[in-house]
Amino acid sequence: MPTLPIALTSGEPAGVGPEIAPMAWAALRGELDFFLIGDPSHLPAGTPLVLIDAPEQAAAAMPQGLPVLGRDFGAPRVPGEAQAVHARHVVDAIRDGVALVQAGRAAAVTTNPIHKKALHDGAGFAFPGHTEFLASLAGRAHVVMMLACSELRVVPTTIHIPLADVPAALTPELLEATLRITHASLASQLGHAPRIAVAGLNPHAGEAGAMGREEIEMIAPLIARLSAEGMQIAGPLPADTMFHPPARARYDVAVCMYHDQALIPIKTLDFASGVNVTLGLGFVRTSPDHGTAFDIAGTGTADPSSLIAALRLAREMAGA
């Protein structure tokens, strides 16, 4: 039976998405099949492309050009300048990609970067980001954002909120749900129970209460309970000593308490090829770990490494 292709959404047309999609096709044809959901007129001039009517046609189209499930976004692309008319179509492309995966017509969805303000202004987009929108489409109350590269996997427990709001948002229920989803998802992907390292919230993991009591009152008791259930889980650990090579060798994934605590180490280790993965959706979703890059859109300098890695990881996870 032929392997299902991956659905790649267009992302923000004014960003680098339309430029890196053909680069990914050039790098991956012959290795895996995918198709772009977007406006073919937004692709760079001279892009080899094949318009398709259905995902099932992607495999046959891949040797000739980038398979495109065409949509009319209503206006030309202007690199670096988001247009309100595009916003609804960007959202619809994400919705269509998810629907195709849920219908068993695509193996996974990989999403090009969106510009949240452009979607809010142009389409009334009410979600903080891709992750929350995908959770809504999947009907899941809670999903987990994981960033992955060859050297590290990290999960932020709280995501797109101000740092000042983190202590109140970091409830025992949220942390437990994050740990359980991470454990179950990686056990499926890895084929064995993952080793989980959990960061503390405060400097030095609270230093026995001298710098905060969240570790003593919430994080440590939860870790002890989950450990008693059989999870391979360690912590709370000082975040400033978790990410050097000997420390990383002791775990498969680091669960952190807030956005930058997780994203700074992985983007330092591998800025170009990191991948954003959403766990707990019931289907596979990956994305490049970078934004729309308006500042370089249209200059011909975009790096497709992260998108290529995202498509490869989507194929790997879908296979698992």
Image: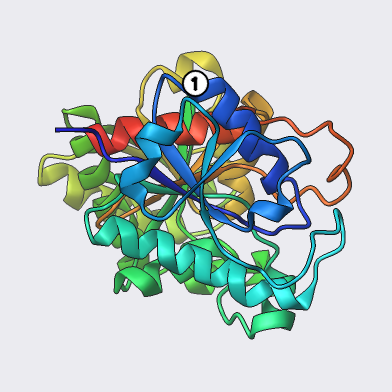
203 or 138: nearer the eye? Answer: 138
Assign the C terminus to one quadrant of the image.
top left
Assign the N terminus to one quadrant of the image.
top left
User: Residue 41: horizontal and vertical position, in percent?
Assistant: 71, 54
Left or right? Give the position of 196 relative to 61: left
- For residue 228, above or below residue 91: above
Q: How many marks?
A: 1
198 or 316: nearer the eye? Answer: 316
Mark 1 Cα-neighbour bin, 10 Å: few <14, some 14–19, many ≥20: some
52 or 19: nearer the eye? Answer: 52
Left or right? Give the position of 111 relative to 161: left
Residue farthest to the top?
246
Q: Which residue is mark 1?
A: 151
User: Residue 43: horizontal and vertical position, in percent?
Assistant: 71, 46
Amino acid, disc 1 = Glu
Q: Is residue 28 visible?
A: yes
